[in-house]
Image (tube, rainbow, N blue to C red):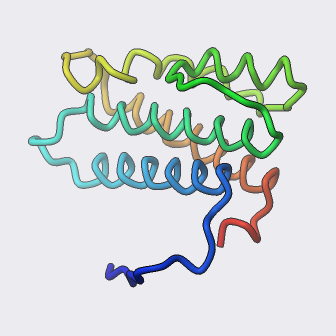
């Protein structure tokens, strides 16, 4: 797929739009890497991008609601920030906390997991993506 590049953006995206788009990019990359089933791609890299997608979707919600957050990678902490700020989340969201070890260690260490779990997380993240899109407005994301 070719991308059209220009020297100046038509408008700068809002923080929540940027987080949503970056999360979508991480989810797409993980989904593609899993689908091509290339032995040269470590499963930890797939899980790293799944963790990144979860983090960015949660940050998109927080940003949309005007909640300040520190530079954190902890999905549990992001979920807690949503909860204390009365931001509703889908029931499945807490399962994404299992991705926390992949925030940093997943890039450098060998963490045993299997591809079945990756597909489960992809499915959960697709649900979260849809949920976030409805909350922050689909028009802002096109």
* Label tally: 0
Q: To which quarter of the image does residue 107 belong?
A: top left
Q: Residue at x 65, y 23 (%)?
A: 78
**In the figure, residue 81 lies in which quadrant?**
top right
> Residue 8, relative to residue 38: is it above or below?
below
* Residue 32 as seen in the image, left or right of residue 26: left
Q: Position of residue 117 (x, y in %)?
A: 41, 28
Query: Residue placed at 72% from the left, 41% from the top?
Result: 63
Residue at 50%, 17% in the rendered image: 98
Residue drawn 23% across and 54% down?
A: 36
Q: In the rendered view of the protein, which quadrant contains the N terminus?
A: bottom left
Name the side, left or right, on which 53 lies relative to 109: right
Q: Residue furthest left?
A: 40
User: In front: 52, or 46?
Assistant: 52
Where 67 falls versus 108 (above or below)?
A: below
Picture coordinates of residue 34, whole percent (x, y): 30, 46
The location of residue 101, given as percent across then percent down, is 40, 15
């Amino acid at each position: 797929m070719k991308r059209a590049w220009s020297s100046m953006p038509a408008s700068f995206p809002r923080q929540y739009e940027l987080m949503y788009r970056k999360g979508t990019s991480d989810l797409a990359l993980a989904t593609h890497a899993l689908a091509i089933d290339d032995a040269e791609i470590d499963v930890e890299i797939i899980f790293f991008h799944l963790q990144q997608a979860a983090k960015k979707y949660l940050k998109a919600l927080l940003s949309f609601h005007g909640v300040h957050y520190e530079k954190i990678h902890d999905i549990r902490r992001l979920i807690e920030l949503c909860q204390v700020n009365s931001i509703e989340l889908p029931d499945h969201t807490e399962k994404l906390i299992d991705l926390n070890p992949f925030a940093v260690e997943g890039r450098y260490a060998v963490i045993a997991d299997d591809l079945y779990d990756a597909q489960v997380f992809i499915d959960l993240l697709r649900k979260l993506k849809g949920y976030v899109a409805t909350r922050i407005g689909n028009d802002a994301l096109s």
